[in-house]
Image (tube, rainbow, N blue to C red):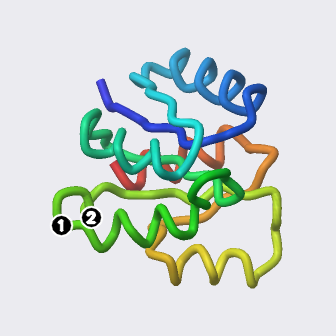
């Protein structure tokens, strides 16, 4: 079973996405901010991370950049998720080290395709 870490501060988004992924057969772990997300990447060792960009404590751009500069977790694919659909947001996420980018609200079939392509 593939493990996915969802780093998301919005409870409704976390609940909706985690339930949908669990129904699709994924093992899901949750972190509520970027700092907790980095710690969970080391302890949970997910196959993929869904990283919200607008997080408290440490935002998703910083958490992604820190993850990709840490040899222990750098190889874990990260899909950046944001409600901001501007090209500049996609570029910023990719520059931080994200492996892919998607917008919220989540289009599950599209997101599942991206997850499968990276795991």
Residue 57: image x %, image y %? 60, 53
Cα–Cα gap, marks 2 and 1: 5 Å
Residue 35, image x, y percentages: 47, 50
Q: Residue at x 55, y 52 (%)?
A: 51
Contact flag, marks 2 and 1 (Cβ < 8 Å):
yes
- Residue at which label 1 appears: 71
How busy is the neighbourhood of tag 2: few (under 14 within 10 Å), some, or many (20 plus)?
some
> Picture coordinates of residue 28 (x, y %)?
45, 25
The secondary element bearing badge 2 is classed as loop
The circle drawn on residue 51 is none
Query: Callout 1: few (<14), some (14-19), or many (20+) C-alpha neighbours within 10 Å?
Result: few
Q: Nearer the viewer, residue 12 or 56?
A: 56
In this view, the residue in front, 28 or 64, is 64
| Residue lying at 46% horizontally and 65% vertically, measured from the top left | 64
Instruction: Tell me the residue at 53%/47% (across/down).
Output: 50
Rendered position, 119 above or below 86: above
Image quadrant for the N terminus? top left
In the picture as drawn, the residue positioned furthest to the left comes out as: 72
Look at the numbered disc 1 and give the secondary structure of its residue: loop
Q: Is residue 100 above or below residue 111?
A: below
Q: Give the residue displayed 33% in from the left and 69% down from the top.
A: 68
Please name the residue that numbered disc 2 is placed on.
Answer: 74
Q: Position of residue 102 (x, y in %)?
A: 66, 59
Image height of 24 relative to 113, above or below: above
* Left or right for 14, reference 99: right
Q: Viewed as shown, does residue 88 lie left or right of 75?
A: right
Image mark count: 2
């Amino acid at each position: 079973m593939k493990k996915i870490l969802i780093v998301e501060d919005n409870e409704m988004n976390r609940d909706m996405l985690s339930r949908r992924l669990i129904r699709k057969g994924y093992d899901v772990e949750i972190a509520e901010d970027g700092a907790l997300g980095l710690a969970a990447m080391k302890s949970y060792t997910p196959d993929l991370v869904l990283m919200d960009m607008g997080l408290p404590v440490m935002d998703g751009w910083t958490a992604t950049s820190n993850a990709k500069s840490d040899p222990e977790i750098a190889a874990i694919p990260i899909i950046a998720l944001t409600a901001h659909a501007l090209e500049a947001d996609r570029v910023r996420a990719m520059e931080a080290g994200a492996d892919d980018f998607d917008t919220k609200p989540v289009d599950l079939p599209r997101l599942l395709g991206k997850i499968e392509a990276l795991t």
